[in-house]
Amino acid sequence: MKKKAKRNQQRQTGKRAINRTYKSTVFIMLFEDKKNLLELYNAVSGKHYQNPELLEINTLENAIYLSVKNDVSFVIDARLSLYEHQSTYSPNLPLRFLFYISSEYSVMTREANIYGTQVVRIPPPQFIIFYNGEKEQPERKILKLSDMYTVQEGEICLELTAVMLNINQGFNEKLKETCKTLGDYAEYTGRVRKYARKMGLPDAVERAITECIQEGIMREFLEKNRAEVTYMSIFEYDQERHLRQEREEAYETGRKEGFEEGSQAVICDLIRKMWKRGKSIREIAEDLEADQTFVEEIVERVTEQET
């Protein structure tokens, strides 16, 4: 019992340390509240739990995982769930989840005899991504680790499946109605993005917070944490915009300069393989984070060469 209490204390200490640094996000702050998280879990799973104390919340504690800054993981109903918010789509999320779940299982079984003859029981995992980025995405999308493999095998020996739910306006409205906190969060972040197109980012965040408080959207949370939410929102949106600009610049550089260095052959081969595996042009463009018109040009070129 003492060892367990010590581990729990270490978890809580690590959690507080992370949540007071710039690595924190509004999503983490909002859903580390057990009441809010239980509401979200019930909405996603269709369960009807009432006692928030059933939740055991874990957040990423090690420096190696700080870049995966939007994670909230927890254990309930003998299941280990990991929820992550993303404003930027990444096909690499299954690999990141694999790193995380491996670390979490390692901690959970630290005192177990994994070399013994008795089965070491572990909770089954669940991976959910709540997406509200600007890039168009379907209402629901399945991301698989096997889609990242360089060779597609008939029998997959290691698989990890994550579900990405689009929480932008017009998507998964029933889910957001069932979990008002999630709906309010999506509304707030949507307003920040909308106003940031018209005015400076600090002013956009301030206007979104003021309006949400006046309209009863996350009122208590925003009133209590206004200064911290303001800082985090500015950092998050600024980082999102910076990463988007970096990708666009890198893509243009790759098109103009990379092809001259032989990159065109590599990209064409990758697109050809994905096309032959039955992926659509849109899916290929999404997976490679490339312009759809560019992928169409490569597919047409490859098709002409093979006919």
Image (tube, helix red, strand yellow):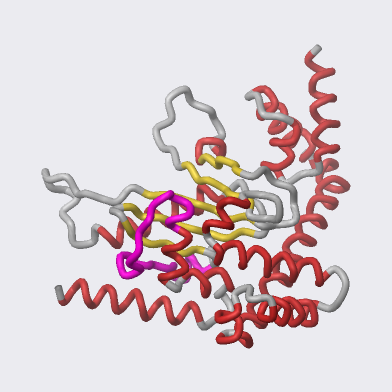
- Regarding residue 234, the answer to whether it shows in the image is no
| Res. 112 image quadrant | bottom left
- Regarding residue 258, the answer to whether it shows in the image is yes
Q: Is residue 297 left or right of residue 71?
A: right
User: Residue 124 lies in magenta, yes or no?
Assistant: no
Q: In this orientation, which residue lies closer to the viewer: 35 or 252? A: 35
User: Residue 60 lies in magenta, yes or no?
Assistant: yes
Residue 37 lies, in percent from the top left, at 45, 65
Q: Which residues are magenta?
A: 41-66
Counting every numbered tag in the picture gives 0
Residue 180 lies, in percent from the top left, at 56, 64
> Which quarter of the image is occupied by the N terminus?
bottom left
Residue shown at 68%/65% (left/top)?
187
Q: Is residue 288 left or right of residue 264?
A: left
Q: In this orientation, which residue lies closer to the viewer: 303 or 227? A: 227
Residue 109 lies, in percent from the top left, at 24, 58
Image vertical order of residue 81 relative to residue 227, above or below: above
Residue shown at 67%/82% (left/top)?
230
Residue shown at 80%/50% (left/top)?
251
Q: Is residue 273 left or right of residue 64?
A: right
Residue 145 lies, in percent from the top left, at 50, 41
> Which quarter of the image is occupied by the C terminus?
top right
Image vertical order of residue 306 relative to residue 240, above or below: above
Residue shown at 63%/73% (left/top)?
217
